[in-house]
Amino acid sequence: MCPAVCCTNNKQVIMYTHYLLGALGVSNPFKKYITLLQITQFQLCVFHAVVVAAGLFESTYPRMLATVQVVYHISMIYLFTQFAAKAYTAKGDKDVEGSKASGKKQK
């Protein structure tokens, strides 16, 4: 099995376990690391797509789709990095998800 598929599957198990814990009302102290794991996965996807788009190895995957994938994953890296900066830094909101869910305004 392809290593990328294994990586994605493992990340999905971690994420859905996090969602399950949240649904059960359990606070997950590893939220920050799950976000960092997602950003890392997007970076690996960009690397893979660049390799395919550049034609560095023979692939049946269309180069144009690989180029689209590069743009898409760069946008995801940007969005997730912005979220992480706001949610997990001292300058950002302490609990972005909690404040939105409860309807309270941040000070």
Image (cartoon, rainbow, N blue to C red):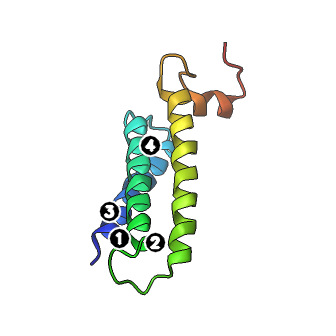
- x and y, in percent, of residue 58 in the image: 34, 83
Q: Which residue is mark 2?
A: 53
Mark-to-mark CA distance, 2 and 3? 21 Å
Amino acid on which disc 2 is placed: Ala
Amino acid on which disc 3 is placed: Cys
- x and y, in percent, of residue 90 in the image: 48, 17
Amino acid on which disc 4 is placed: Thr
Q: Which residue is mark 3?
A: 7
**On the rendered structure, is 3 left or right of 106?**
left
Q: Which residue is mark 1?
A: 5
Residue, x 53% and y 68% (percent of image)? 67
Check if mark 3's residue and mark 4's residue have beta carbons within 8 Å.
no
**On the rendered structure, is 58 left or right of 27?**
left
Image quadrant occupied by the C terminus: top right
- Whichever of labels 4 and 2 marks the residue nearer the N terminus, that label is 4
Res 37 label: none
